[in-house]
Image: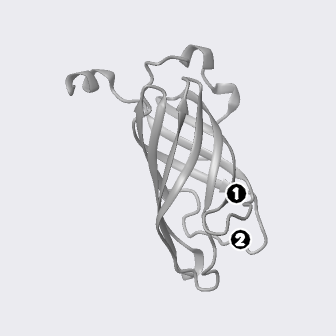
Amino acid sequence: MGQVDVQNKSNLEENKTSEIDLSGTWQIEVSQKPWSGMPVFEDDDNGIATARIIQKENKITGHVSCHARFAEKQGSLHYEKEFDGKFDGQTFLYQDTKVKGYINNHESMKKMETCLKTAELDFFIKDGYYYMEGTWSGYGHISGGPCSSGKIIMKKRIPDIKKKKNNK
């Protein structure tokens, strides 16, 4: 997915509306500043995680599903992560709340954790997609120790309004 060109982002004030419904399935890319011993994933930025969002007014709940393989057949990583937050039409205040079903079978990094993240994600529209993007900080889901921060980019095709209205 990669970073979206800031100059091509829609005017955020035009998008600030309660009409925007974030509900649905999003592609999610989470990057992290490098750290010593950081593992490499087989498919580092494509198809590793999806997010399912449910929006009721300005309140957001959802979960992230991660299913990844480490490079060089070092093992795999699987988990579900619940999150919540608020959306004001311009910014999604994101916060991970719980990790479920965590399975890490990396050959040499069995104690590696996932990070519980918080972030302010900027919402914008570009080329027929909704985007939310921003930097995150967090802590280990087991130890509570600090994580190296990073970036979250979420992307979802804008739903067809006509189809949505006909299905209600």
- Disc 1 marks a residue whose amino acid type is Gln
Residue at point 57% right, 57% down?
Answer: 45
Residue 25: percent from left, percent from top: 40, 44
Residue at point 72% right, 65% down?
Answer: 145
**Element marked by disc 1:** strand
Q: Is residue 33 left or right of residue 154?
A: right
Which dot marks residue 19? Answer: none
Residue 20: percent from left, percent from top: 45, 23
- Image quadrant where residue 31 sits: bottom right
Mark closest to the chain's N terminus, 2 or 1: 1
- Disc 2 marks a residue whose amino acid type is Met
Crowding around mark 1 (Cα neighbors within 10 Å: few <14, some 14 to 19, many 20+) is some
**Element marked by disc 2:** loop
Colour scheme of this structure image?
one colour
Q: Is residue 167 above or below residue 105?
A: above
Residue 35: percent from left, percent from top: 77, 67
Q: Is residue 20 above or below residue 129?
A: above
Q: CA distance from mark 2 to mark 1?
A: 9 Å
Residue 41: percent from left, percent from top: 59, 69
Q: For mark 2, what is the residue?
A: 38
Residue at point 47% right, 19% down?
Answer: 18
Residue sitting at the far right: 36
Task: Say whether marks 2 and 1 touch (CB < 8 Å).
Answer: yes
Which dot marks residue 32? Answer: 1
